[in-house]
Each structure stands twice: as structure tokens, then as C-alpha cells.
Amino acid sequence: MMIFDGKKLADKILDSIKKETASWLKKPSIAVVSFGDKKDNSSYIIQKRKTAESLGFNFKHYYYSKEDFSKAREYLNKIVKMESVSAVVVQMPLPAEINNSILNVIPPEKDPDLLCDRSVGAFFNGHSLVNPPTAKAILDVLKESNIVITGKKVALFGYGRLVGRFLVPMLIKEGATIAVIDKDTPKEDAKHISLGSDIIISAVGEANLIKSDMVKDGSVVIDAGFSILYPADGGIDGNIVGDVDLESVKDKISLITPVPGGVGPITVARLFSNVTKLFKYSTKFKN
């Protein structure tokens, strides 16, 4: 079994961005906005902050607690209208109290995560300047590992707004046959589909969802899930895990992306690649 080193590929992408932007007098500025419990997304925010600093990009985190939820749209609208901000990333998922429609205040030219409806529409119409970071990262893994996608059966667990809905057309374009498994798919059907697939991709956020009895010998497993398991005693130091029970599947599969260290670092690198592209685009039309 090969364990894919996501950090190595991410560093290659980031090195390319550094070279491209080294001579720029003005660098992109990214605003990360989060609502709710800080510990639920702090690891991703820390990773984005460190990446921004390594590239010389400006970074600011705007955090709003539950008391601020009623004014979420107002706060986000204020941030996106700041001329000093070239990219806005909202940590997902949003709390249940906040409607996803607030994401539509983000203009496409400041939307490296493709969160607003206009960005999504541009992607599906083939007019997007950038690719969805996680979906692109998953394709990066497959291509970097020389995995042939054309003609392969793919089981995709999860059809969320950040990964699944973008990944389906991208994989179809590559010539794959895809079966989507979501929360309404009966467990036995999910297992049957998964067992018959050459490539299994999971982006659900449910620890140990994929076990050995769901994968066939030699299959490729891309774990894009993310969960934090906190101690039963209420401690704040949790363990980051993916959707796949690695110990259970390791003797059957040919390749897997670990969590952490697999798809995650590449997703962040692709996010900053998008930030760079959008900044170049907006600067071009301002000059």
C-alpha cells in the first residue's frame, strides 16, 4: 500500500506560487471568516494563516460568536467590500442558525472557494477562472500517482457543496463512471457499490465510515473527510481523522491519502493558487 504524501505535492504548488509572486510589489490579502465554536475549525485556519505568511500574503481572521449570528450577512458584506481584501473564505459548514444564502454577498472575483451561486454557475457553465480547491486536489492526487481515471468505476461518498457536486462533472470529463452515495443511500447498497469500485472517494466527515468490507483488493482510496474526535472527558485537544478506517483497509488497497497530511495540504495550496489567479485577474482590470 502506498500512502500519498500530500504535503510534498502541496509544497511544489506553493513553491510555484512563491516564484510567480516574488517580484510583485503588492500581494494578495485573504480574509477568513468563521462563525461559531472556534475549536471546530481552528486547525484549518491555522494552516491557512501559516501558508499565507509563507507566501508573504496578508491574512486576517474574522471570528463571530453565536451572539453575532443575527448580523452575519451584515458583517460578511462589510468584509467583502473592503478594498484591501482580495479574497474571502468562509469556514464551512455554517452553523444551522445561519442560512447559506449569505455566501452570495461574496463576489466571484473574491471567491477562491467557489461559495457564491455566481461562482458555482460559472463553474458549471465552463467560465470559472478557478477550480474548486478540494475537488482539484483530489484529481491532483490521482494524476500525480499515475492512476488511470478513464474507464474506471468511482464510488463517491458525499455530495456536499464544497466537494461532491464539483467532483462529479470533473471525473466524468476524465472518463470515469461515477456512483454517488449520500445519506439516503441504504447501507447495503453503499457497500455493494463501494466493493465494485476501482476508486473510492469519501468526503463526508464521518469517522471510520469506510471499512475493509467495503473495499476490493487493489482499490485506490481518497480520504477527503475531516472530523475531530475529542476526548470523552471534555478535553479540548482532539484528534483529526478522516472517513476511512486506515488500519482496517491497509492490507487490501493499493493507495490511500492519509488524514491529516493527504488531501488537506493540497486543498490549501490550491486555495492559494486560486487567490493568486483572482488577484491577477482583478489587478489586470483595475490597471
Image (spheres, helix red, strand yellow):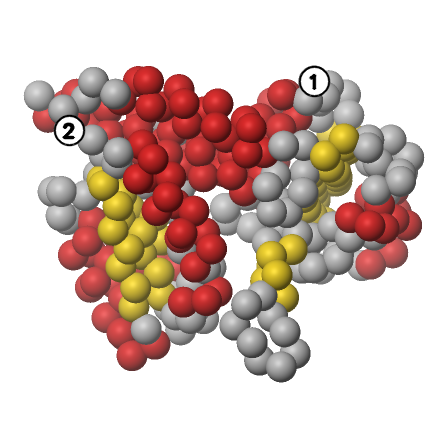
For badge 2, the amino acid type reads Lys
- Residue depicted at x 54% and y 42%: 264
- Residue depicted at x 51% and y 39%: 265
- Residue depicted at x 44% and y 33%: 269
Quadrant of the snapshot with the N terminus: top right
What x and y, as percent, mark residue 56? 26, 34
Per the model, the C-alpha gap separating discs 1 and 2 is: 37 Å
What x and y, as percent, mark residue 99? 38, 65
Left or right of 187: which side holds 146?
left
For badge 1, the amino acid type reads Asn
Q: Residue 146 carries which label?
A: 1
Left or right of 2: which side holds 233?
left
Is 51 above or below relative to 19? below
Q: Nearer the viewer, residue 142 or 116?
A: 142
What x and y, as percent, mark residue 238? 58, 66
Q: Residue 196, located in which quarter of the rendered image? A: top right
Q: How many labels does the image show?
A: 2
Quadrant of the snapshot with the C terminus: top left
In the picture of the structure, the residue carrying the numbered disc 2 is: 26
Q: Residue 114, located in which quarter of the rendered image? A: top left
Q: Is mark 1 on a helix, strand or loop?
A: loop
